[in-house]
Image (cartoon, rainbow, N blue to C red):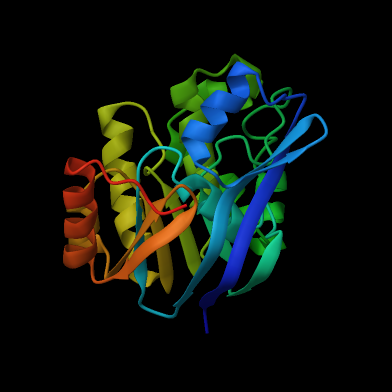
Amino acid sequence: MAAVELDNVSFSYPVFEVTGRSLKMTVMRQLVGSKIDLGVGSVEIAALSEISFHLGPGDRLGLVGRNGSGKSTMLRLLAGLAHPTKGRMRIEGRVLPLIDKGLGVNPELSGFDNIELPLRLLGASDAEVRRAKEEVPEFTGLGAFIHMPVRTYSEGMRARLAFALCTAIHGEVLLLDEWLGTGDADFYQRAQQRLQQMMGVTQIVVLATHSTELMKSMCNKVAWLDRGRLIAIGDPAPVIGMYLAAQQAGFEPVA
């Protein structure tokens, strides 16, 4: 049974060669408030601070917050692309992260030759890899480009390949970052249909988006993040209402 559990999870990272009088320091103070630790030639950025919540089967969690609030960092932690510096995190079930178009992709190889490694990183079996090699080329609609080096692809073509790879296998926990741009209108429709199918069978979904209407229609929980802190979590309507009201009032969280 799928589960996502965070218990007082924090994540920080150092930024080096920054002095107290520099422009970078001024900008970082504005971005993260007082939650920075000074070292010799470095600044410790608290991207997430003491986050706790639990998700089980059927939960669809929306992440809301201003740019730089910690939404993408949260998704990267849940995807296993980063690890908490404090606290405890437990995830049960296969995680499918639609958050990084470059995960496991070698730009020097063709799109077809890039099918296996990203899927292996996601825990795909031999049978799933074989099935993906049959389905991915057709679903992407890349035609002959599927046999060209990925470095020759446009951003839209890379997004198509990444989307097809991340949705080629089934998992229990689905992570979505702004739905991942997918190119032209025809492919967008196919991508939306596949996402809807996946969300219907996936046990847990975590979605970061600026669309509050999308969250209200698709999520049963919303978490409001600001400057790395969890301000509120609960039913979508009241949490989104508090977030929008705070934005209009010029909300500044307590340091």
Find the residue positioned furthest to the front.
21
Q: Is residue 87 left or right of residue 231?
A: right
Quarter-of-image position of residue 169: bottom right
Q: Is residue 135 visible?
A: no
In front here: 157 or 225?
225
In the rendered image, which quarter is residue 250 located in?
Answer: top left
Residue 95 screen position, x and y as percent: 57, 63
Rendered residue at 60%/15% (across/down): 152
| Horizontal and vertical percent position of residue 138 | 46, 38
Residue lying farthest bottom?
A: 1
Q: Nearer the viewer, residue 220 or 106?
A: 220
In the rendered image of this protein, does residue 3 appear above or below residue 50? below
**Residue plotted at (18% across, 44% down):** 249
Q: How many numbered dots are placed on residues in this image? A: 0
Q: Residue furthest right?
A: 40
Residue 248 in percent (x, y) is at: 17, 42
Left or right of 32? Residue 39 is right
Q: Farthest residue to the top: give it.
A: 152
Relative vertical location of residue 132 with respect to residue 223 in this rendering, above or below = above
Image coordinates of residue 68 in percent, x first then y, are 46, 39
Horizontally, residue 167 falls left or right of residue 181, namely right
- Please state which of residues 91 and 254 is positioned toward the viewer in this rendering: 254
Is residue 182 in sight in this rendering?
yes
Q: Quadrant of residue 139?
A: top left
Residue drawn at the location 50% of the way across and 46% of the way down: 72
